[in-house]
Image (tube, rainbow, N blue to C red):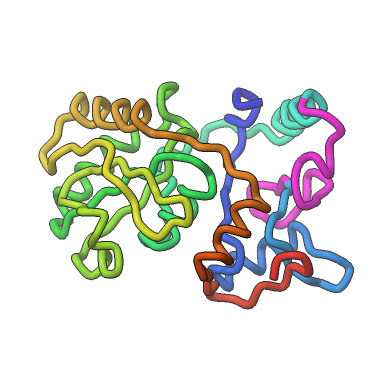
């Protein structure tokens, strides 16, 4: 499955957090009333206009088994293959620390935070991380966010982020996090790889039961205010 997906640009959307993204997701999948659901699945052409597969809330709504899904991915990749384009190598970054911590908590993945107010240093770190992010050891296993100002840390001072690259375990509800590994601003590619590897090994991926998670959140009075109103009939 993972090998078959490498022929695609795989996007992990942040539903209800971006108006332009929501328009695309609504084209991918919405119910008969036009409501955007909290989860969406579909395969689109490279221009984002044509649906190349049926759509639903998840792949399991479209395909009967993982094997069928894998076969469909390979067939679509063969039909849509183009030559001469370089593979995407940019960091798959998330838009801000608040959402990044929440996504990392939801996905049960370590969060890699690149933080520096120096553009040249930040660019150098990102370039080295880009090569690592798409390598066999790390591809799909980490989430990333890039911060360029001290104001980006407001509300999350307890995490203790320092300039450089930090691998963070998000708290279960994405309200804070603990640093698992760190590499300094001038870290070499080898030091960055060691930090990512150390963070992965130290990460404690505790499986979540959705109902129990929601009950605990209600008990603690935790609420998430999304940028857009939640339109999923079952997600209020």
> With 135 as the anchor, is 69 left or right in this view?
right
> With 10 as the anchor, is 137 left or right in this view?
left
Instruction: Residue at 48% x, 49% y: name it.
Output: 105
Q: Is residue 52 visible?
A: yes
Residue 206 picture location, percent across and down: 51, 37
Foreground of the two, 183 or 82: 183
Quadrant for the N terminus, please: top right
Would you identify the image quadrant in which residue 9 lies?
top right
Foreground of the two, 228 or 155: 155
Please tell me whether residue 64 belongs to the stretch shown in magenta: yes
- Report the span colored magenta: 43-66
Residue 168 picture location, percent across and down: 32, 44
Vertical side of 212 occupied by 236: above or below: below
Our reading of the magenta stretch's main secondary structure is loop
Q: Residue furthest left?
A: 186
Please tell me whether residue 213 belongs to the stretch shown in magenta: no
> With 174 as the anchor, is 226 left or right in this view?
right
Would you identify the image quadrant in which residue 215 lies?
bottom right
Residue 183 picture location, percent across and down: 18, 37
Instruction: Residue at 48% x, 35% y: name it.
Output: 205
Q: Residue furthest front?
A: 219
Would you identify the image quadrant in which residue 31 lies?
bottom right
Vertical side of 177 occupied by 187: above or below: above
Vertical side of 48 occupied by 164: above or below: above
Residue 157 picture location, percent across and down: 23, 62
Quadrant for the C terminus, please: bottom right
Foreground of the two, 225 or 16: 225
Foreground of the two, 145 or 107: 107
Vertical side of 55 occupied by 109: above or below: above
Q: Is residue 86 visible?
A: no
């Amino acid at each position: 499955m993972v090998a078959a997906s490498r022929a695609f640009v795989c996007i992990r959307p942040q539903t209800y957090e971006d108006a332009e993204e929501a328009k695309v997701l609504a084209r991918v999948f919405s119910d008969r009333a036009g409501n955007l659901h909290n989860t969406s699945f579909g395969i689109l052409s490279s221009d984002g206009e044509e649906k190349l597969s049926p759509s639903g809330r998840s792949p399991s709504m479209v395909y009967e088994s993982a094997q069928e899904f894998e076969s469909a991915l390979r067939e679509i990749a063969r039909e849509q293959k183009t030559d001469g384009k370089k593979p995407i190598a940019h960091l798959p970054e998330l838009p801000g620390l608040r959402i990044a911590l929440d996504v990392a908590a939801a996905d049960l993945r370590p969060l890699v935070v690149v933080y520096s107010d120096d553009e040249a240093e930040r660019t150098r770190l990102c370039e080295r991380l880009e090569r690592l992010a798409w390598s066999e050891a790390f591809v799909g296993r980490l989430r990333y966010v890039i911060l360029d100002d001290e104001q980006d840390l407001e509300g999350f001072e307890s995490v203790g982020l320092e300039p450089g690259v930090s691998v963070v375990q998000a708290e279960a509800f994405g309200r804070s996090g603990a640093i698992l590994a760190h590499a300094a601003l001038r870290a070499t590619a080898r030091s960055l790889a060691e930090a990512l590897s150390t963070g992965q090994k130290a990460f404690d991926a505790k499986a979540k039961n959705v109902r129990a998670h929601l009950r605990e959140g209600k008990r603690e009075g935790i609420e998430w205010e999304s940028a857009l109103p939640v339109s999923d009939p079952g997600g209020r």
